[in-house]
Image (cartoon, rainbow, N blue to C red):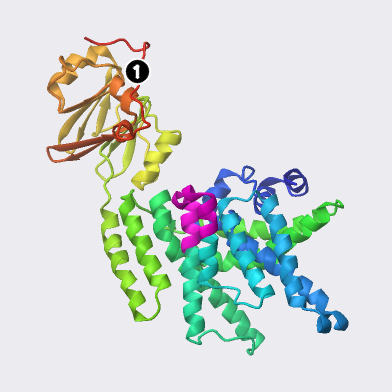
Amino acid sequence: MTDRILIALPGENGGVAAALITGERGKIPENVLAAMRESGLAHLLAISGLHIGLVAGFLFFVSRFFLSLSETISLRFPIKKWAALFALTGSFFYLMVSGATLPTQRAFLMLALAMIAIVIDRRAISMNIVAWAAITILIVAPESLLHVSFQMSFAAVVALVATYEAASNSGKIRRWNITIGKRATSYVGGVILTTFIAGLATAPFALFHFNQVALYGILANVLAVPLTAFLIMPFAIVAVCLMSIGLEAVPLQIMGWGIEAVISIASFVQSLPGAVFHLPAFDVWLIAVIALGGLWLSLWKGRVRFLGFIPILIALTIIPNGSVPDLLISETGKQIAIKDGDGKLGFVKGGKGIVAETWLKRAGNPLVEFEQLGSNIGRLVLCDNLGCSANVSGLKVAIVHHMAAIDEDCSNSDIILATIPISRSKCSRPEIVIDRFDLWRDGNHAIWIDGRDIHSDSNGGNQAKRPWARYPRTPSVYPRVP
């Protein structure tokens, strides 16, 4: 199906169309993915509640409309329930075709419960449905509780259901006895409110996992969601239905027009000043406190629910104080980074690759890449063929790459980061010495400097506390230094 889509709709439009229909995102160019992320439209590419809801809604209303054209059928049979079962069947097909990812499973479970509720004449949307969907997923895959997709999708759904339940109970949501103009205004207002609530609920989790959040998500979604709802997804369904007889090209072309407009919206919002807010990594207990506060706010009734704001506000005041390490060195020694005076990471060595990208993301700042080893890179770091020296928070740091630099650096430095083995007996003056064996044994190292207080941490230092983490044997490729 992906190949058929790309033949009929080549380029970036086809890549997005394939992602929306079959869940295959590998054909989307990186610049489009970045634009969607930084504009707050990345959720359109992950098949979840929006897509399952649009598919089911389209199938439900279309099938019910055609059934209602027959007076005999509409008066004698429960066509609403038939439409619900038809929508459920079509949504299950979509779930299987798209790969049944965790957000799609969650959305389908909730949809299935909603459709069954229609069949048995019960309320279709409620917090009970959310709870049953969560319980089912956690019984099958309990580790999903720690996945970002589970956390963000359920955070958004819980917040939205709680908001609309509260609005419905207060009588602020009117039914269909209003004019078309007011319905259109109500729809736009609903998109704005839904985007605001969902964005607010998922922002802490986005900051925790991705260290950034899109600030203009409401603007992007108000423009892009109607295109997705009325143009992209309906013609995606038509294209899938016609694919078996080879007539998918026309609906895919129409779908491509909508996708092109959405990509243009994403690029425009991405280009706005301050479109993305970055934040350094913070402790996991803070996101747990925010989650508990959000659950209190969503599940309780009456004024007591507003007590949930207290832990959320306390956590939000602490989150901006997250600290970026002053020094970072990877387990291979191929990446070394130093925090500059502005709190941004600069790479003395190896400023590209997944390790560098992860460090920059967790530091909450965009790429600031120093010049390569061997050149003069200004006041912060000086390098030659033997290594580099830097002044970090008043302490002298030596980065050693060659044996010839060991004696001088050990006598003049406070911290040594070495990509070669170093004898501790010959290098006792520095407060911290991290050499090739430390990197091999404990993995990546991070160092924080607070005046004369120095704190270091490593991957292996944490893993050593776990019963399944084995202490490695000494490798033969690195000779012992006496």
Residue 228, image x, y percentages: 64, 63
Q: Was residue 153 drawn as part of the magenta stretch in this picture?
A: yes
Residue 105, image x, y percentages: 60, 55
Residue 325, image x, y percentages: 27, 40
**In this picture, is 282 found above or below 126?**
above
Residue 374 in view, yes or no: no
Give the residue at x 87% y 82%: 72
**In this picture, is 418 found above or below 158?**
above
Q: Was residue 284 drawn as part of the magenta stretch in this picture?
A: no
The residue stretch that appears in magenta: 135-155
Give the residue at x 28% y 15%: 402
Residue type of the residue flagged with mark 1 = Arg
**In this picture, is 433 found above or below 308?**
above
Nearer to me, 330 or 258: 330
The part of the image, by quadrant, that contains residue 104 is bottom right
Residue 242 in view, yes or no: yes
Give the residue at x 41% y 56%: 205
Residue 474, image x, y percentages: 33, 15
Q: Which residue is mark 1?
A: 473
- Label 1 residue SS: loop
Nearer to me, 133 or 11: 133
Secondary structure mostly seen in magenta is helix
Nearer to me, 473 or 199: 473
